[in-house]
């Protein structure tokens, strides 16, 4: 990747801040059928598969 292309990417802290503001404390059912609560210490990790349609599963079902 060239330096010019790298400049188009933002830092991960910005993505963390967006997720924190939007998802904090919300509960979701994932595409795999499991449940996820954002921001809890015992919450599931999730896998987001990028493509034509996003697929969001728990980390166990993502493999």
Image (cartoon, rainbow, N blue to C red):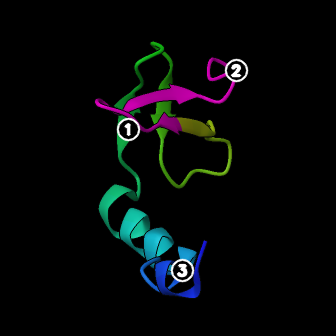
Residue under label 3, please give it: 6
Q: What quarter of the picture does the C terminus occupy?
A: top right
Q: Residue furthest top?
A: 33
Crowd around label 2: few <14 · some 14–19 · many ≥20 (10 Å): few
Q: Residue at x 48, y 14 (%)?
A: 32
Residue 55 position, x and y percent, is 40, 27
Give SS at disc 2: loop
Give SS at disc 3: helix
Residue 26 position, x and y percent, is 35, 47
Q: Give the CA distance from mark 2 to mark 1.
A: 22 Å
Taking 7 as reference, is 29 above or below it? above
Q: Residue at x 54, y 80 (%)?
A: 6
Q: Residue at x 38, y 38 (%)?
A: 27
Taking 41 as reference, is 51 above or below it? above
Residue under label 1, please give it: 27
Q: Main secondary structure of the magenta part?
A: loop
Q: What quarter of the picture does the N terminus occupy?
A: bottom right
Left or right for 40, reference 52: right
Which of the marked residues, 1 or 3, is nearer the chain's N terminus?
Answer: 3
What span is in magenta?
48-63
Which of the marked residues, 3 or 2, is nearer the chain's N terminus?
Answer: 3
Q: Residue at x 30, y 62 (%)?
A: 22
Q: Nearer the viewer, mark 3 or mark 2?
A: 3
Q: Residue furthest front?
A: 2
Crowd around label 1: few <14 · some 14–19 · many ≥20 (10 Å): few
Q: Are marks 2 and 1 in contact (CB under 8 Å)?
A: no
**Residue 37 in magenta stretch:** no
């Amino acid at each position: 990747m060239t330096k010019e292309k790298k400049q188009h990417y933002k830092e991960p802290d910005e993505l963390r801040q967006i997720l924190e503001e939007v998802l904090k404390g919300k509960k979701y059912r994932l595409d795999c059928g499991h449940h996820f609560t954002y921001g809890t210490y015992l919450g599931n990790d999730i896998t987001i598969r990028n493509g034509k349609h996003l697929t969001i599963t728990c980390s166990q079902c993502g493999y």
